[in-house]
Image (cartoon, rainbow, N blue to C red):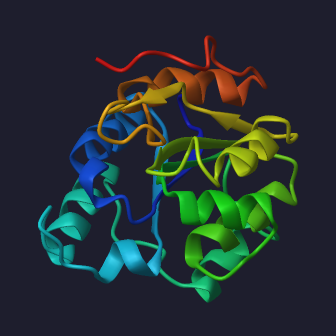
Amino acid sequence: MLNRRIGFALTGSYCTFAEVVPQIEAVRASGAEVLPIMSEGAAYADTKFGASKMWKEEILAAAGASKIVMTIIQAEPIGPGKLLDLLIVAPCTGNTIAKIANAITDSAVTMAVKAHLRNQRPVLIAVSTNDGLGLNASNIGKLISSKHIFLVPFGQDNPVAKPSSLVAHMELIPEAARLALQGIQMQPLLRVRA
């Protein structure tokens, strides 16, 4: 991914941030320039998984960036400026999946996706939602069949206690990104999570 411009957007699945931040670093280590983006919920919530200030510092360090895009206004130029070769949304919550699938633009991340897709460039989504096999299954299906949208392989993370929950294999983000840049969906898409 040498010299590629990669947007890396995080939404509010706070429990997966620790898995995702090393992938930002891995994408950058592959030679890409990384633009970090966060939804407002991800950027400002202090949770049991860590304070927002801490996560922003870790994300900036992993991306080697000086700023994070955190507003709709900041994300809008991604489209007209053709600023990115690929946009990764990881983790992508069920809420954000539903918004992308139904063309709702009300956050920095959904604006980044809309702006980037106008250029018919690839978006890679790493699912992380408790209702992936529930009400959001139809939205995931819409994304799977949409042009220019690719998914990181995913599976059930806790089929007994949370039978509708799906989480991507975050460690596959760098390879899935390389393939998405070539217009290829990484296979197999459905994988057992250990």
Kindly identify the residue that appears in the image at 54 percent across and 25 percent down: 153
Residue 144 horizontal/vertical position (percent): 76, 36
Tell me the quarter of the image containing the C terminus: top left
User: Toward the viewer: 57 or 194?
Assistant: 194
Q: Which image quadrant for residue 147?
A: top right
User: Toward the viewer: 128 or 119?
Assistant: 128
Q: Is residue 73 left or right of residue 169?
A: right
Q: Is residue 67 visible?
A: no
Q: Is residue 133 visible?
A: yes
User: Is 61 rendered above or below residue 175?
Assistant: below
Q: Is residue 68 left or right of residue 102?
A: left
Residue 129 horizontal/vertical position (percent): 47, 50
User: Is 167 rendered above or below residue 90?
Assistant: above
Q: Is residue 99 left or right of residue 90?
A: right
Kindly identify the residue that appears in the image at 56 percent across and 25 percent down: 176
Tell me the quarter of the image containing the N terminus: top right
Kindly identify the residue that appears in the image at 47 percent across and 26 percent down: 155
Kindly identify the residue that appears in the image at 85 percent across and 42 percent down: 146
User: Is 62 rendered above or below residue 102?
Assistant: above
Q: Is residue 166 left or right of residue 141?
A: left
- Residue extending furthest front? 160
Q: In the rendered picture of this protein, how many numbered marks are placed on residues? A: 0
Residue 28 horizontal/vertical position (percent): 39, 39
- Residue extending furthest top? 188
Residue 75 horizontal/vertical position (percent): 62, 76
Q: Which image quadrant for residue 172?
A: top left
Q: Which image quadrant for residue 180?
A: top right
